[in-house]
Amino acid sequence: MTESRLHIVADRNIPAVEETFGHWGTVQSVEGRSLQAADLEDADVLLVRSVTPVNEQLLADTPVRFVGTATAGLDHVDTAWLAARGIAFAAAPGANANSVVEYVLAVIAGVDDVLERLLAGGRVGIVGYGHVGRSLAQRLGAVGIASLQYDPWLDADTLPEPAALAEVLDCSVVSLHTSLTRAPPWPSYHLLAAPELATMDAKTLLINASRGPVIDNTALLARLQQSQPPRCALDVWEAEPLVPPALLAAARYGTAHIAGYSHDAKLAATRMLAEALATRFNLGEPGAGSIEPAASLSIPAELAGGALLRFLWQARYDLAADDKRLREAVLGASAADAMRGFDALRRNYPQRRELAGSTVLISNENQVALAEATGAMVERVG
Ligand SMILES: NC(=O)c1ccc[n+]([C@@H]2O[C@H](COP(=O)([O-])OP(=O)(O)OC[C@H]3O[C@@H](n4cnc5c(N)ncnc54)[C@H](O)[C@@H]3O)[C@@H](O)[C@H]2O)c1
Ligand SMILES: O=C(O)[C@H](O)[C@H](O)COP(=O)(O)O
């Protein structure tokens, strides 16, 4: 494979592909959800998102020699088949972990007095201690919020506070961050079904930003229609792009699988794939797909404690706006329009920047320690 001959087929929802990969050949943008083998007749490289199943059926009769997925999740990729065929593969582990964490923090800040209860000694139960789960535990711990973790695939001594699933589900906030697997002995498919959901009540805030099928959505809707239902924030749905209207109506927050969609995360994923391709085929440096620093954020001087944390966790990410857009697209729409609306929200997602690593302007010295604990970079002013 030489630079001048690369034909790169990429999901049009992966940003900065032309700038980053364009000098290695031609870039063709395609609709990922409807991609077929016929679209890949001349392709050397395929870049996908989670909506494209990558398997023998798609690739067997194509010349594709490298597949990159701009995602953390791999459940749409038959990695064993790719390896057996000698097709190189790369993903973007961790690229969007921070973005997902900031979605979770915005949920916590947005639901009732959950944040205050956590600061007063409540705990967050984290299910799945990979890139997102680890980052969430670290970000919570930095501001004084305790977490328990359940991840039976890992050695317990690699978890800060390992716990049984039942203990984790008993926390006031339960946040799901498992990969989607049906593999024994610990499949995450339908990890939360009727028996587990029955242990939760109105004191629980249940957050799913992992994969829809980790919760049995039929059982969840049934639980939400019973007394004392848990409060729910759902970013992922069992049969995307289908979002069951009744489930969305019953959720405190519902979003279109965009927890990982910060601008920072998307560009980081593109960069990771370009570096993997360059390494695999000795191509030299990727093109510049640089990211501008986010605009600085001024912090009102009177805020302290939970109010300051809530301000910071909501300042960069408008969760309520994402929730409103999904309800407008789904509730009252035909199923076909609702599914088109779901994909359109993801395709036209507004630019969102992350708090961690961005600059906050502070005039009140008493705010500095907590602001720094959120991962923001403090610039003293005034
Ligand atoms: N909503 C979004 O936009 C978004 C963005 C990024 C990632 N994700 C999804 O979030 C999940 C976590 O992402 P990540 O980057 O941390 O992935 P990761 O692969 O780094 O971590 C996943 C963890 O889940 C654990 N796990 C698997 N089965 C489990 C089970 N039955 N019980 C408990 N833990 C289990 C694994 O051992 C692993 O440590 C993935 O499903 C990913 O697809 C969603
Ligand atoms: O696994 C992930 O990384 C995310 O769920 C993924 O980024 C979701 O977005 P999609 O790839 O479907 O656009």
Image (tube, rainbow, N blue to C red):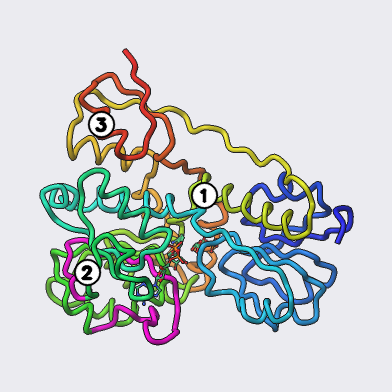
Please state which of residues 140 and 354 is positioned toward the viewer in this rendering.
140
Residue 207 at least partly seen: no
Q: Is label 1's Cβ within 8 Å of ligand 2?
A: yes
Q: What element carries label 3?
A: helix
Please state which of residues 278 and 335 is positioned toward the viewer in this rendering.
278
Residue located 43% across and 37% down the image:
357
Please state which of residues 265 and 166 is positioned toward the viewer in this rendering.
166
What residue is shown with label 1? 265
What residue is shown with label 2? 168
Which badge, 3 or 2, is on the more N-terminal residue? 2
Q: Is residue 112 depicted above or below 75 in this figure?
A: above
* Residue 381 part of the magenta segment: no
What residue is shown with label 3? 369
- Identified by mark 1, the residue type is Ala
Residue 284 at least partly seen: yes
Residue located 30% across and 62% down the image:
233
Q: Is residue 26 depicted above or below 157 in this figure?
A: above
**Segment colored magenta:** 166-194
Find out whether the residues at labels 1 and 3 contact each other: C-beta distance under 8 Å: no
**In the image as oriented, which residue stretches furthest toward the top?**
382
Which badge, 2 or 1, is on the more N-terminal residue? 2
Which quadrant is home to the N terminus? bottom right
Give the x, y percent position of residue 312: 31, 37
Tell whether 98 sits left or right of 224.
Answer: right
Q: What is the spatial separation of the Cα atoms under label 2 and label 1, in whole angstroms?
A: 28 Å
Q: What is the spatial separation of the Cα atoms under label 1 and label 3, in whole angstroms?
A: 26 Å
